[in-house]
Image (spheres, helix red, strand yellow):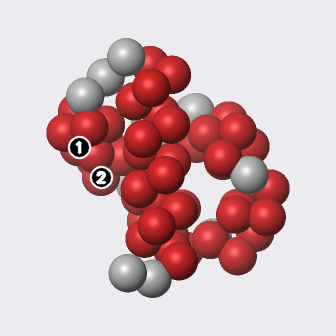
Amino acid sequence: MNAELEFLIYCIEEYKRLHGTTGRETFRLFERSGASRYIIDHYDALHTAGVEYTLSDIAGMV
């Protein structure tokens, strides 16, 4: 598994924990909104900022 995918999974897990959604619901939300692609495409910058920043950054997308 590559680092980008691992970070995406971590973000999905943290989002579902914070918002009380299931993994499936969160994955679908991230896919529909484009958040998954955004996280993968901007991995280099986002993973250094941390998951809290990343979730805040995508808040308007999801």
Is residue 38 at least partly visible in the picture?
Answer: no
Q: Residue furthest front?
A: 1
Horizontal side, residue 56 vs residue 19: left or right = right
Q: Quadrant of the N terminus?
A: bottom left
Please tell me which residue lies in front, 13 or 40.
13
Q: Is residue 29 above or below residue 31?
A: above
Q: Is residue 16 above or below residue 50?
A: above
Checking the image for residue 28, the label placed there is 1
Q: Is residue 36 above or below residue 1?
A: above
Q: How many marks?
A: 2
**Secondary structure under the numbered disc 1 in the rendered image:** helix
Residue 59 screen position, x and y as percent? 58, 33
Horizontal side, residue 57 vs residue 28: left or right = right
Tell me what residue is drawn at x 41 percent, y 56 percent: 9
Q: Is residue 1 above or below residue 54?
A: below
Residue 44 screen position, x and y as percent? 70, 76
Which residue is disc 2 drawn over?
31
Residue 13 screen position, x and y as percent? 42, 41
Horizontal side, residue 54 vs residue 45: left or right = left
Please tell me which residue lies in front, 25 or 17.
17
**Secondary structure under the numbered disc 2 in the rendered image:** helix
- Mark 2–mark 1 Cα distance, whole angstroms, equals 5 Å
Please tell me which residue lies in front, 58 or 20.
20
